[in-house]
Every structure is written in C-alpha cells, then in structure tokens.
Image (cartoon, helix red, strand yellow):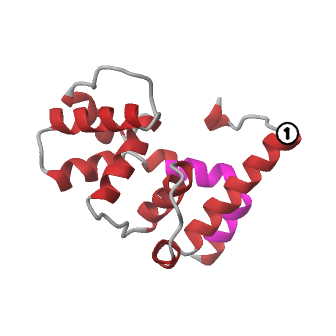
Amino acid sequence: MLSWLAMLKTDTDSFARLVNANRAILIKTLSLLCQNPLSEVSEALTTHAVTHGYVNIRTPPKATALKCWYISEYAPQWACRSAFDLLCQLGWLPKSDIEKAIAARYLLLNNYSISDDWLKLLGNWLIIAQHISRTRKNSHITGNNTPTENQK
C-alpha cells in the first residue's frame, strides 16, 4: 500500500480521480446515517450548501436525484461538500482507505482545522491531500495553472 500512497503523492491527477470517482459515498452514507426521507436529506444538503457558499441559492434536487447520484457514483461537488460537513456534525468517521482519502480532501476544501485526531485517523491520506493542495496553490501563484482533465 505504501507504494500506492507514494504514487498518489507524486501524481495529483490519480488522487483527484480516486476522490472524484468515489465522493458520492458521502451522499449515500449521509442518507443511511440520518435515516430521514431523501427529500429531507436533499433539503438539508441544499440549505447547508447555500448557507456555506458551496452553491448559489437553488431549489433542492428531487429525492430521486440523490439516489441517482450515489447509484451512478457521481454527485456534484457542492452536495459532497455539504454532505461531508453534515456527516462530521453527526460524528461520522471514515473507515476505509477510500473514505479516508475523501475525508482528507474535504477537510482541506471545506477549510477545517486539522486536529491531532484527524491527523492520526487519516495519516498518509492527509499528507497527500495537503501536498496536493500546496502544489495547486503554488501553481496558481506562479501562473502555472493549466487545468487537469478533471478540472476542464
């Protein structure tokens, strides 16, 4: 596994593909954990996303859209950011390596303070996410901001 982690640290596109291909897990996990009807989950996701500036004011998607997102393994970034925040409020912690990679990415994207508990739990995944975040910030500062395939 360490060679895989090392490869992800040097290949930012691989980490992005891993996170983006699996981020809909956050929507599914939230819907299972809170056990509310999907219409209420959709409302909570949208309200939270609008309040935190993840998305402009909008009507919540239909409940069926949430189900489609996690079945198709694609969900919009704003919904995943919101789901991550709501999961954290519920005390959720990632268990699998994929969940840890996703959590590391969203901790940084959503500007969380990185506690010792998060460092211990996420380990190398957080180091990789921080490295990529710094690399991307530096490329924007230097003007080398050629978009990756996932950003186009």
In this rendering, position of residue 56 left or right of residue 13: left
Q: Assess whether residue 16 is covered by the magenta stretch.
A: yes
Question: What residue is rendered at 80% in x and 49% in y?
Answer: 138
Question: What residue is rendered at 76% in x and 53% in y?
Answer: 135
Q: Main secondary structure of the magenta part?
A: helix
Give the percent coordinates (x, y) of residue 111.
54, 52
Give the percent coordinates (x, y) of residue 132.
69, 56
Residue that protrudes farthest toward the right in the picture: 142
User: Which residue position holds label 1?
Assistant: 144
Question: What residue is rendered at 69% in x and 63% in y?
Answer: 9
In this rendering, position of residue 6 left or right of residue 69: right
Type of amino acid at the residue the image marks with label 1: Asn
Q: Is 152 drawn above or below residue 34 in the view shown? A: above
Q: Which residues are magenta?
A: 5-19
Q: Quadrant of residue 44?
A: top left
Quadrant where the N terminus sits is bottom right
Give the percent coordinates (x, y) of residue 8.
65, 62
Q: Residues within 10 Å of mark 1 (few under 14, many from 20)?
A: few
Question: What residue is rendered at 57% in x and 67% in y?
Answer: 126
Visible residue check, residue 25: no
In this rendering, position of residue 147 left or right of residue 61: right
Visible residue check, residue 103: yes
In this rendering, position of residue 64 left or right of residue 85: left
Q: Is 89 drawn above or below residue 115 in the view shown? A: above
Under circle 1, the secondary element is loop
